[in-house]
Image (tube, rainbow, N blue to C red):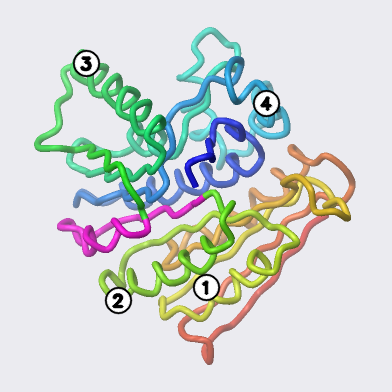
Amino acid sequence: MLSYRHAFHAGNHADVLKHFITLQLLQYLGQKDAPFTYIDTHAGAGLYALDTGYAAKNAEYENGIAKLWNRTDLHPALVDYMALIKQLNPSGKLRYYPGSPYCAEVVMGLEDRLRLFELHPSDVKILQENMRKREQHQAEQGLRARGRRVQILGGDGFEGLKALLPPQSRRGLVLIDPPYEDKRDYKRVKDTLAEALQRFPSGTYAVWYPVLHRQESRELPRKLMQLPASNWLHVTLSISQSTPDGFGLHSSGMFILNPPWTLEATLKDVMPWLVEALRADGDAKFTLESGQGAPAKVARKVVVRN
């Protein structure tokens, strides 16, 4: 839907969860010398101003990144994430927040590849400009990538993904985080992942979704557990109790297929800290589940902290 603009929600609690985990996945892949490919099916604008425009209207960042900005007791797992944001704001005032493509571009190596899909024509232009500025910054530092390191693809990421799998690098991370304004997005996520696993079964796939009252949202994790990945990890973060009418975003989740073996332990350690840092009321909590293989082999673990 072309009415959706992520700038309205930039830097909120859901972005904190999504981008912290995305960085964990990218850093794990980057530990090996072999290059890898990052594919973002719904890339957005890449960088957002928080004090003007869309982001300033609802100021959702105040329930997310703003609560971490002045913390002097950051959990060690969050240090790199916050350092990236601090670099974007050298004045010491929180004015800018990075989207997933910007986070990926900063931490990935020059031999790695980024393939960024965005459907909204206005955001495509902004994303192109933001990535151009990053390339110019690298050139000024004497850093130049070989070939087309970053490609911005205007169009439907669900449809476009299949043509990129498997990536030439045979190593990769795919981030899928549609707006879900259209309830058909839930089915498209599941169907896209089912086909992607056939084409690239060893890839890591991360799905962000809003935890809402609507049936499609509640059923999505269970459907993703049925997919033939070797293992999966599912985490949710709730900053408050949801309202009876279901209005507003109080909780979100990340579902990772083929996650790094280190990620579950990291989340067990950091999520209680995040709950305390971002809580809006006494009902703030997180859940964490993991499993292996097809449905018949699933071994689920659940951790909840209030």
Question: Alpha-carbon distance for marks 2 and 4?
Answer: 41 Å
Mark 2: amino acid: Gln
Mark 3: amino acid: Gln
Q: Which residue is mark 1?
A: 224
Mark 1: amino acid: Leu
Locate residue 245, reporting x and y percent: 85, 53
Find numbered disc 2 in the image and state the secondary structure of the residue it sits on.
helix
Find numbered disc 4 in the image and state the secondary structure of the residue it sits on.
helix
Mark 4: amino acid: Ala
Find numbered disc 3 in the image and state the secondary structure of the residue it sits on.
loop
Locate residue 120, reporting x and y percent: 41, 38
Magenta stretch? 158-178
* Residue at the image position 30 percent from the left and 23 percent from the top: 134
Q: Check residue 176 for magenta coloring.
A: yes
Do the residues bearing badges 2 and 4 touch, measured as CB atoms within 8 Å?
no
Name the front one of labels 4 and 3.
4
Q: Which mark is residue 198?
A: 2
Q: Which residue is mark 3?
A: 141
Do the residues bearing badges 3 and 1 touch, measured as CB atoms within 8 Å?
no
Q: Which mark is residue 66?
A: 4
Sequence-first disc among 1 and 4? 4
